[in-house]
Amino acid sequence: MSDALPPVLIPESDIEARVAELAQQISADYADKGELVLIGVLKGAFIFLADLSRQLSIPRAIEFIAVSSYGSGSKSGAVRLVMDVRGNIEGKHVVIVEDIVDTGNTLHYLIGILESHGPASIKTCTLLHKASATEVEVDIDYVGFAIGDEWVVGYGLDYAEQNRTLPYIGNVTPTD
Ligand code: IMP
Ligand code: MG
């Protein structure tokens, strides 16, 4: 990959505005439900989770879960649990916070893992959704932006660990 910055797909100001809208919507939906547990999916969701969680107007707790797909770069593979949530989420309302839903395999797998912990409810939130890449249908309750079937980086997302901390969403052309 060249050193040039990836072209902008979604500018920082659009992300900021959309994250604020999502936070308002989630705050309204959970206003009468007590504490909400946001579960960020490492590593990609760390920036989105940080921004989203700080804009909620309801009580919330933060947990993380880590998964990895076999293979690197842009190839999708079998999903593997790297780190489970640490806190007890039994009987609690949880929202899974993802950076992007591509084939849907990761989110489908995560819902299965988290269901086994007996939460009161599970909803899903993703900043980005590649709707045309769906292989496994998963209900997504909160979506930031729908994008095409292209590889994107920035705002937490990487390509081979590059460009994770770009402030905007850019697109790159994978070479694998
Ligand atoms: P899945 O295909 O829905 O299981 O997505 C698997 C994971 O691949 C996502 O959680 C992301 O971490 C990663 N991923 C998918 N598409 C992209 C992309 O365009 N950029 C960066 N990461 C991606
Ligand atoms: Mg991810």
Image (cartoon, rainbow, N blue to C red):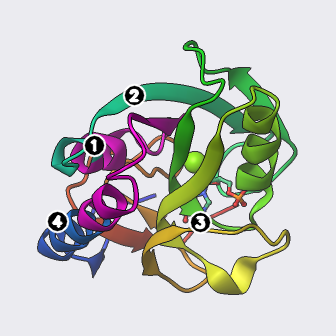
Residue type at the position of mark 2? Ile
Residues at discs 2 and 3 in contact (Cβ within 8 Å) = no
Determine which of the numbered discs, if any, sits on residue 174 in the image.
3
- Residue shown at the point (18%, 48%) measured from the top left: 57
Which residue position holds label 2?
62
Callout 1 secondary element: helix
Q: Earlier in the sequence, mark 4 or mark 3?
A: 4
- Residue shown at the point (37%, 27%) measured from the top left: 61
Callout 2 secondary element: strand
Residue type at the position of mark 1? Ser
In the rendered structure, the answer to whether residue 16 lies left or right of residue 149 reads: left
Q: Which of 80 and 113 is in front in this view?
A: 113
Residues at discs 1 and 2 in contact (Cβ within 8 Å) = yes
Could you tell me how far apart the alpha carbons at marks 3 and 1 are, in whole angstroms? 31 Å
Q: Which of marks 2 and 3 is nearer the N terminus?
A: 2
Could you tell me how far apart the alpha carbons at marks 4 and 3 are, in whole angstroms? 27 Å
Which residue position holds label 4?
16
Residues at discs 2 and 4 in contact (Cβ within 8 Å) = no
